[in-house]
Amino acid sequence: MKPLGRNAFVSFARTKSRSFQRLLPWLAALSLLLTVMATPAVASPKASKGRSPGAVRAVRPALASPAEQSLLALLDAANALSRREEIPYVWGGRTTSSPVVCAACKRCIEKRKLNPYQRKASCPACEQCGLDCSGFVSRVMSAAGLQTGRVTSQSLGSRKSKVFKPVGRDLVHARPGDLVVLKDHVVIFLRRHGPDKFDYIHASRFIPGRKTGGIEVVSSSALPRRLRPIVILRHESLFGVGYTPAVRSRINALITSHQEDPVRLARAN
C-alpha cells in the first residue's frame, strides 16, 4: 500500500475534524438528557415548607357524584333543622318560618297545653311553623333538591310514591338518607349499629326537655318488635351512594353535636 503524502494526510485529518465538529451539538444534547434523567426531582423550598422529609403529597380526592352531592345536601339540611329548637311538632305541619313565628307557636302550645292534633287549628302561628314526621322528610328532601311530591307516612307505607323505591324491610339493607317507614311514622336513617340498633333523625312528638317536640336525633336505638319497619325506601336519586368519607364525616358531626348538648340528647331505647 502506497503511503499517504504530507498534503493528502492533512486533507484527510481536516475532513474528519469537520465531521466530528458537526456531531458535537448532538452529543452535548444527549449528555444533558441523560443527566436530567439520572437526577432525582427536588421539591422547591416553598412547596416543601411544613412537610416532613419523605412525606407523600396527598392525592386530591375524586369529585363527588351527583347522588353523593344530593345525600350530603340532605344531611346538611337535616342537621340545620335539628338545631332549630324553636320548631315544634305540629300534626299536618309542613312549613318553617322565622324564629319569632316559631317561638310564638311554641308559646301558644305551652300556654294552652295543646296536643299535636290541635295545634295547627288552634294557634295561627302554628300554621306557619311546625313539622310532623312526613313534613320533616319533605322539607329536608326539598332543601336537598330532591323532588318528592306530597308524602305522608300512610302513602309511603303503601308504596304509592313514584320517586321512593323499596329496598327491603331489614335494616341491613338501609343506607344513609333512606326512609324507615313504621306504623304511622317515618324516620330518616343515618347509620346502623349491629343487626337491630341504628341512628336516625325525625320529627318527634315528645323530646326530653321540649314538651312541644321537634326535630330529634336518636342514637343507637333499637326498635320494639311491634314497630318492625313496614318498608325501607330510597329516593331514586340516591342509589349508588355508600358510606363515603364525606358521608361518614357528616353523620359523625351530626351525631356528635347532639350528644354534646344535654338538652338535645336523644333517648336510646
Image: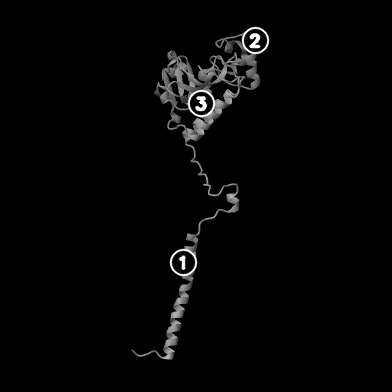
Mark 3 to mark 1 CA distance (whole Å): 64 Å
- Image quadrant where one finds the N terminus: bottom left
* Residue in view at x 50 percent, y 61 percent: 36
**Percent x, y of residue 65:** 47, 36
Relative horizontal placement of residue 149, taking residue 208 as reference (left or right):
left
In contact (CB < 8 Å): disc 2 and disc 3: no
Q: Hey, what amino acid is under mark 2?
A: Lys
Kindly tell me whether residue 144 is visible in this rendering.
no
Instruction: Between residue 125 and residue 33, name the one nearer to us.
Output: 33
* Mark 1 neighbour class, 10 Å CA radius: few under 14, some 14 to 19, many 20 or more: few
> Residue at label 2?
111
Q: Hey, what amino acid is under mark 3?
A: Met
Mark 3 or mark 2, which is nearer the start of the sequence?
2
Instruction: Between residue 3 and residue 182, name the one nearer to us.
Output: 3
Relative horizontal placement of residue 159, taking residue 60 as reference (left or right):
left
Color scheme of the displayed model: one colour
**Percent x, y of residue 99:** 64, 21
Q: Hey, what amino acid is under mark 1?
A: Leu
Identify the secondary structure beneath mark 1: helix
> Which quadrant would residue 11 be assigned to in this image?
bottom left
